[in-house]
Image (cartoon, helix red, strand yellow):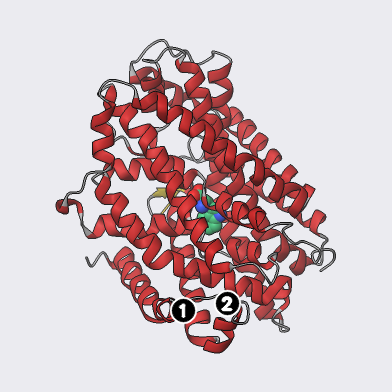
């Protein structure tokens, strides 16, 4: 495995921002607001925080600990063929499954960004039907879908190709603060709209009736996905970490930034939708169909729309580079490639798979797996894979790794105080695996 060894983050901030960049993505900006709208506003946010801080944070810290401990040799840990194949195959399969649909949504973003900026989508009518038609006609055009998706793949691969520090770290260092600033400006504009306060109230409301098993499952799934847990992204990112970094605070910052951006985006989207009496409950179409209609009510609406798609693209790319980063060392190791060769091979794989996924909406729409088109199937299947990955991390750190070794690594050989270390291990050993088992059985057997 040539030239993978010299990759180390150049600063602690670089690491935290890269991990946060991986976390902040379509999960927070596209999915979180509609889950909040669907599951009772503030109630869902509360459940999400419970899952993030109670379980996901512990698993994230376990990934960080394991990743730094194993370092960049983690993929060569097994000498026998089957072991190596499984160890390397897993991150490739999971990354590719997620990226196959993720890149398609990124393609939509490219389309909407360009069309909003160039005036092709006119923000002069607030009739949702017009925006609905635009979305439908996009899904019906294989060529445009493929083109837009490939543009995004190209941008992603370009960053990975430049390297961990020059490419990945720098991009995050620049994009994440920018994203935050644009988001704040947009929120301030929206909050001054008449009627927006109802939306804010909704975002912070709490209603016991919404505490259902369905909402709890959605909150946990969202916590895993939005914190990039369970596939190895965070393992790889932490294998580039130097021995003196404080893993515990890095994990905490990552969770706070990841969840924070989700809440901020909800504060942008939900009040805007409330202010003009649209239905916030429009599911995945919320950002692509409802919001454009909302923006049409604003002066210079097209600028707001373009800005929204810009920050979505920024958030998405910091995640796609992390997903590519998870697959690349495994691919390099499996086929004895250099980092750059592996990146180019992976780019080709992504182009093929995402193009097929784009066709799920038009040419291949008749093809279904378990009654779902391949796009939806990949989304659901990746939930299982992530949960399975998270389970393995809990078992390895909670049960297999000697306690002293885990504690030494997480506290940098006792130099970093960690008062809750016992609680952390307890969560990993008992709580997180039990919760995962309950959830998976519920997903499969629908028992609750
Ligand atoms: N967390 C990202 C989001 O919210 C997606 C993502 C990036 C991811 N890397 C991951 C999800 C690894 C699961 C595992 O959009």
Q: Residue at x 34, y 41 (%)?
A: 34
To which residue does mark 1 refer?
Answer: 421
Q: In the picture, which quadrant includes the C terminus?
A: bottom left
Q: Is mark 1 within 8 Å of ligand 1?
A: no
Task: Report how far apart the C-alphas of labels 2 and 1 lie in the structure.
Answer: 9 Å
427 or 192, nearer to the observer? 192
Marks 2/1 in contact by CB < 8 Å: the verdict is yes
Label 2: how many residues lie within 10 Å, few (<14), some (14-19) or many (20+)?
Answer: some
Q: Earlier in the sequence, mark 2 or mark 1?
A: 2
Q: Is mark 2 within 8 Å of ligand 1?
A: no
Residue 230 x %, y %: 51, 65
Residue 283 x %, y %: 33, 39
Horizontal relation, residue 18 to residue 61: left or right: right
Residue 17 x %, y %: 60, 51
30 or 375, nearer to the observer? 30
Task: Give above or below for 189 relative to 235.
Answer: above
| Number of marks drawn | 2
Horizontal relation, residue 253 to residue 165: left or right: left
Q: Residue at x 29, y 56 (%)?
A: 47
**SS at circle 1:** helix
To which residue does mark 2 refer?
Answer: 411
Residue 136 x %, y %: 43, 27
């Amino acid at each position: 495995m040539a030239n993978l060894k010299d990759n180390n983050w150049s600063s602690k901030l670089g690491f935290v921002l890269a991990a946060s960049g991986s976390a902040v993505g379509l999960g927070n900006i596209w999915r979180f607001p509609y889950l909040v709208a669907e599951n009772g506003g503030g109630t869902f946010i509360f459940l999400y925080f419970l899952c993030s801080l109670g379980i996901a944070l512990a698993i994230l810290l376990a990934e960080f600990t394991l990743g730094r401990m194993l370092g960049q040799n983690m993929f060569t840990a097994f000498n026998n063929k089957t072991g190596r194949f499984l160890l390397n195959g897993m991150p490739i399969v999971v990354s590719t499954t997620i990226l196959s649909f993720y890149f398609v949504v990124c393609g939509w973003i490219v389309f909407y960004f360009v069309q909003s900026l160039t005036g092709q989508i006119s923000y002069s009518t607030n009739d949702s039907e017009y925006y609905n038609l635009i979305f439908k006609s996009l899904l019906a055009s294989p060529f445009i879908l493929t083109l837009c998706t490939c543009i995004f793949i190209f941008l992603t691969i370009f960053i990975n190709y430049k390297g961990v520090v020059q490419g990945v770290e720098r991009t995050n260092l620049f994009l994440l603060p920018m994203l935050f600033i644009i988001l704040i400006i947009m929120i301030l504009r929206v909050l001054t709209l008449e009627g927006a306060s109802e939306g804010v109230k909704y975002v912070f409301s709490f209603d016991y009736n919404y505490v259902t098993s369905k909402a709890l499952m959605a909150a946990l799934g969202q916590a895993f996905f939005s914190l990039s847990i369970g596939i190895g992204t965070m393992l790889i990112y932490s294998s580039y970490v130097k021995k003196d970094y404080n893993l515990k605070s890095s994990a905490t910052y990552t969770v706070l930034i990841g969840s924070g951006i989700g809440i901020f985006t909800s504060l942008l989207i939900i009040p805007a939708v409330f202010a003009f009496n649209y239905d916030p409950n429009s599911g995945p179409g919320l950002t692509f169909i409802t919001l454009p209609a909302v923006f049409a009510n604003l002066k210079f609406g097209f600028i707001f729309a373009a800005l929204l798609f810009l920050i979505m693209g920024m958030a998405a790319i910091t995640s796609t580079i992390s997903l590519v980063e998870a697959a690349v060392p495994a691919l390099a190791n499996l086929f004895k490639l250099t980092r750059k060769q592996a990146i180019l091979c992976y780019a080709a794989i992504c182009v093929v798979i995402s193009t097929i996924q784009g066709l799920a909406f038009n040419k291949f729409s008749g093809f279904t797996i378990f009654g779902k088109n391949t796009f939806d199937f990949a989304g659901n299947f990746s939930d299982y894979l992530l949960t399975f990955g998270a389970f393995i991390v809990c078992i390895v750190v909670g049960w297999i790794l000697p306690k002293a070794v885990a504690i030494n690594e997480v506290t940098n050989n006792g130099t970093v105080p960690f008062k809750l270390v016992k609680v952390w291990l307890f969560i990993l050993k008992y709580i997180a695996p039990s919760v995962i088992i309950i959830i998976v059985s519920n997903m499969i057997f629908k028992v609750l």
